[in-house]
Image (cartoon, grey):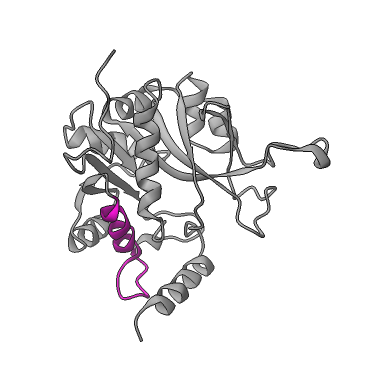
Amino acid sequence: MGETPPSRLDPSGPFAVAMIPARMGSERFPGKVLAAETGRPLIAHVIDRARAASCVARVVVATDNERVLAAASDAGAEGVLTSPAHPNGTSRLAEAAEALTLDPGTIVINVQGDEPEIEPAVIDAAADALLADHGASIGTVASPLAPGQDPADPNIVKAVLAANGRALYFTRAHAPHARDPADAPARPLKHVGVYAYRAAFLAEYARLTQTPLERTERLEQLRALEHGRVIAVAVMETAHAGIDTPEQYRAFVDRWRASQPQ
């Protein structure tokens, strides 16, 4: 029997590095990570959420922009300047982990730079999913769809799981498809885009070739599945959403203002 891996419940305390990939060139909302209608840039809200997770000992922003680097520093996070040419956030974090010379066994949590309302418990759940499955390369989270969410919406990524909690597939399509809606025990799950991995896997991921399904669905986690790696998935209720458009950002600002003491 090997040693039991650490968990967020380990009394030795926080152990993971939360890394936030943050690029300026968003297609639908350029510069969104620096949008500051709350009085603070969006990236600062994400840093706050990451820091509040019980597993997180260190918060690092990996970015292609000096202004984002400065905003991260102002919010109390470390920063690493990375290439602007990365195809996805995992690739960007692989460069940052190498620059920081992280130990290969270090747990790295990929917290998306446009999710200022992510619950710290979701970050912890991704770490726990990885640590609980000794064969997994990645831990992530899925959630039942919220009322009113359309499972056919391609902007909502669906996770399809095996009985053991491992991912079978991720897709933008409506999955699973109910051939007989009156007898359909499997319900769609929304993938929550937070990932936990060890630093050694980040380096491995960067060496893996891009895959047909990854390129077709434009989902970076499919590269791992297509190369035979295991993704462990924790299922929990979560209602937070990322910021992809100016309209979504304004809705976040309204929620944030409503939450402030009067």
Q: Quadrant of residue 116?
A: bottom left
Above or below residue 167? Residue 155 is below
**Is 60 positioned to the left or the right of 238 in the image?**
left
Rendered position, 179 above or below 153: above
The image quadrant where one finds the C terminus is: bottom left
Q: Is residue 163 magenta?
A: no
- Relative to 168, does residue 117 appear above or below in the rendering? below
Judge whether residue 31 can be spotted in this image. no
Residue furthest to the top in view is: 1
Q: Whole-percent x and y of residue 234?
A: 47, 38
Query: Which one is in front, 11 or 103?
Result: 11
Identity of the residue drawn at 53% across and 69% down: 247
Residue located at (46% from left, 76% from top): 254
Judge by depth and name the residue closer to the eye, 29 or 113: 113
Residue at 34%, 23% (x, y): give it. Answer: 204
Span highlighted in magenta in the image: 34-53
The location of residue 33, given as percent across then percent down, is: 36, 60
Query: Which residue is located at x 47 percent, y 41 percent?
Result: 141
Estimate the x, y position of residue 5 in percent, counting from the top left. Answer: 27, 27
Q: Report the front residue among 62 and 261.
A: 261
Q: Nearer the viewer, residue 108 or 161?
A: 161
Q: Position of residue 138 (x, y in %)?
A: 40, 30
Quadrant position of the N terminus in the picture: top left
The image quadrant of residue 93 is: top left
